[in-house]
Image (cartoon, rainbow, N blue to C red):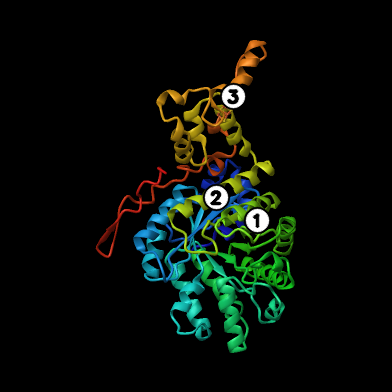
Amino acid sequence: MARTQLQRARDGELTAAIERVAERENRDPAFVRQQVADGQAVIPNNHDHESLDPMIIGREFATKVNANIGNSEETSDLEGELEKLHTAVHYGADTVMDLSTGANLDDIREANVEHSPVPVGTVPIYEAVKHVDDPADLTQELLLEVIEKQATQGVDYMTIHAGVLMEHLPLTDGRKTGIVSRGGSILAQWIEENGMQNPLYVAFEAICEIFAEHDVTVSLGDGLRPGSLADASDEAQFAELETLGELTRTAWDHGVQVMVEGPGHVPMDQVAENVQRQQAVCDGAPFYVLGPLVTDIAPGYDHITSAIGATEAARAGAAMLCYVTPKEHLGLPEQGDVRDGLAAYRIAAHAGDVATDLPGARDWDDALSEARYEFDWRRQFDLALDPARARSYHDQTLPGDNYKEARFCSMCGVEFCSMRIDQDAREADGEMTEIDDETDLDDSPAAEANLPPVGSHDTSGVPEEIEIDGVTFTPAASHTDD
Ligand code: SF4
């Protein structure tokens, strides 16, 4: 039986995936191996995901960003889903989660895995409930069947809400927003109606055996995460976290790679404490956080409310951030929302890496600042997190080619451009002879993992055209223009 990255790392093996990750992050392969062997980092890498370019998730590495894609009963189709995959990878998603709950689940999942160069995650209970009339009719056998099928389809990591226990449910009484996790609410209903323990908890060792066989990373879901500031850091959330710590060690005993999911909605002053608590309870297993949103007041702008919390989480040691789009709480995101959500989260991840002094992270900022001070507009656009948007905003008012070397833009205007005035003054008194533009991103220790994301991922696995059931789709349509 093929072994997991964790088992092989424990045996001292420098796997091809470890070597590739070391190259992408510009780190010593031996260090990467040790982090994986110790459970402090994961390399989601299903044996059957052939188009994958391996990446690593751990607090010692560049902070990663996940984008959720997937359809719902109400909207989206296969073509739209493949376009979302392409958009997500193009704008820098390090992983994608296919959270489809509508039609064609197997076709969409298989197409995503086949064409995705980044790890694909799922939440198998979403499919399982589609096979029964009532969530209370779910059985352990059905759950295992769906999990095994998705593992054989090449899914790299799966969210398993095994930490929602019968004894935790009374702790959610009195919450302002109850149980907001989809998986958590389904399991709570199942437990209440059947009067039995969570079947995912009961079957967790059997799940681990499936995961070990295919090298699926388990992402321990936080089914009792707070859905509002009022419910943050409550007894139910932390009781579940204790169970997630126990399950982390069980999975490690089976040689399964583990990460742990976290909240949700958390006031700014509690974010770092939440990260530190998870790291302590789960023995340093990578923390994968959704946001968190630091205020509940801004539907329509929750990519911003959550990116603020995500920045603080990354600074405190979170390893991966699950993006939130402006559509959060309001509707299924479309391509433009995916782009805006990813931009917000790439910023949060990078700001966190700069704050924790990740080797080389600041080089990107320095290179862009140098281009800005030199009025090298083309280089400034190229270095921008979203080059097409930066160029488009500049060119709205000064589209001409001659303005690409201009010593001003339309923000302050030619007369009041402070950088021009500053440079002229320094040149006049002889203080400034040459602008320092020595930052060389090609030599940056941050390497691929933390450089301008647009185009930095290998998108060769995302095809120009794809044919499914005799129908041709074009998922690789250009997303470079505003
Ligand atoms: S005009 Fe203002 S915003 Fe534009 S380059 Fe000069 S200082 Fe910067």
Q: Looking at the picture, how far across and down is residue 48, in whole percent?
A: 43, 61
Q: Looking at the picture, how far across and down is residue 462, in whole percent?
A: 38, 51
Q: CA distance from mark 1 to mark 3?
A: 51 Å
Q: Residue at x 55, y 76 (%)?
A: 206
Asked if residue 112 can be seen in this view, the reply is yes
Circle 1 sits in a helix, a strand or a loop, which is it?
loop
Circle 3 sits in a helix, a strand or a loop, which is it?
helix
Q: CA distance from mark 3 to mark 2?
A: 52 Å
Q: Looking at the picture, how far across and down is residue 327, in whole percent?
A: 51, 59
Can you tell which mark lies on residue 130?
none
Which callout, 1 or 2, points at the residue further toward the start of the chain?
2
Q: Quadrant of residue 451?
A: top right
Q: Which residue is mark 2?
A: 18
Q: Which residue is mark 1?
A: 40
Q: Nearer the viewer, residue 158 or 474?
A: 474
Q: Which residue is mark 3?
A: 416
Q: Are marks 1 and 2 in contact (CB under 8 Å)?
A: no
Q: Quadrant of residue 37?
A: bottom right
Which callout, 1 or 3, points at the residue further toward the start of the chain?
1
Q: Looking at the picture, how far across and down is residue 358, in whole percent?
A: 65, 42
Examine the rendered structure and indicate whether residue 112 appears above or below residue 365.
below
Q: How many marks?
A: 3
Q: Nearer the viewer, residue 445 or 81?
A: 81
User: Is ligand 1 less than 8 Å from the beta carbon at label 3?
Assistant: yes
